Structure formats: C-alpha cells, structure tokens
Image (spheres, helix red, strand yellow):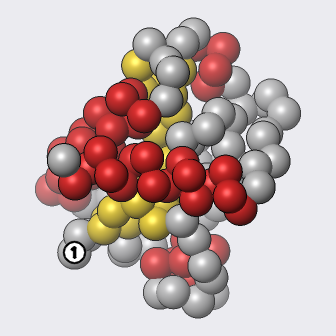
C-alpha cells in the first residue's frame, strides 16, 4: 500500500509543494513545529532513511540545501535544523525546520495548526527565495 507521501507525490493528496526533481519532493508539513517546516522525501518509497541507496543519500542533502537556505531567510531563526526520525510515516523523510534552539526540534511539543492562508504564505516565501 502506498504511503501518504507517495500519494502526495502522485498528486492524489494535495500539498503545499516547495520543490521537486526526478528523485525528491519537498512540501510543507501541514502540522508544523514552526512556520516554514518542510518535509523532504525521496520519490522512491523506502521505509528507513539508512535503507535509501547510497547515491541518493548524498543527492538528498544537495537537494535540501537550497531549501534550507531559503527557510533561513524566510523565517526568524538562527538556522535551519534537520531531523530524521522516521516513525510517523513508513517512507523515509527529513524535516527542515527553522530553529533558534535545539528545543525547537522537539517533536513531543504541540504542533501548530496554521490556516490555509498561513500555509500558502509560508509556501510563497520559500518558493520565491528558491527562484532568486
């Protein structure tokens, strides 16, 4: 059965897309830790991060790098943090989150409930910076 991320990639479930290429897809987390929280996933469905093919692991970081830089510019933070937990969805994924402390990456914290307008504005900010 396809994961929710595979369904998002296939366009079966709507998302706030940030970027994609032949191998990866990035979109906003709709229940973010902080505004600007982006998920980056490989298009190939693999459950565990370290089961992803070696060549794709390095490409993954290269794909995520400009997104992380855009997040840092778009939202008040000290840096863009990265987290790989992999328990929520059986499809390898990384979280890119604007952070000012390590506590900002605490996934036991309450998630934000942003409006559609707020999510669209987050998307717009990041995508616009990726184009520049």
Residue 53, above or below 4: above
Q: Residues within 10 Å of mark 1 (few under 14, many from 20)?
A: few
User: Can residue 108 be spotted in the picture?
Assistant: yes
* Residue toward you, 50 or 84: 84
Task: Pinpoint residue 82: horizontal percent, then vertical percent.
Answer: 44, 32
Left or right of 17, for residue 14: right
Q: Which residue is mark 1?
A: 22
User: Can residue 82 be spotted in the picture?
Assistant: no
Residue 28, above or below 98: below
Q: Residue at x 44, y 13 (%)?
A: 78
Q: Residue at x 60, y 79 (%)?
A: 14
* Residue toward you, 5 or 126: 126
Residue 59, above or below 42: above
Q: Residue at x 76, y 55 (%)?
A: 115
Q: In the picture, residue 131 is in which quadrant? A: bottom left
Task: Pinpoint residue 94: horizontal percent, then vertical percent.
Answer: 46, 46
Task: Pinpoint residue 73: horizontal percent, then vertical percent.
Answer: 36, 29
Q: Residue at x 29, y 33 (%)?
A: 69
């Amino acid at each position: 059965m396809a994961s929710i991320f595979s369904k998002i990639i296939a366009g079966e479930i709507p998302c706030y897309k940030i970027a994609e290429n032949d191998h990866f897809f990035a979109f906003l987390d709709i229940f973010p830790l902080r505004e600007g929280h982006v998920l980056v996933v490989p298009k190939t469905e693999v459950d565990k991060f370290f089961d992803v093919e070696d060549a794709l692991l390095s490409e993954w970081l290269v794909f995520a790098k400009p997104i992380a830089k855009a997040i840092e510019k778009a939202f008040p933070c000290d840096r863009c943090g990265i987290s790989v937990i992999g328990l929520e969805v059986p499809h390898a994924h990384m979280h890119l989150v604007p952070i000012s402390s390590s506590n900002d990456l605490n996934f036991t914290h309450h998630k934000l409930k942003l409006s559609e307008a707020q999510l669209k504005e987050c998307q717009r900010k990041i995508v616009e910076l990726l184009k520049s």
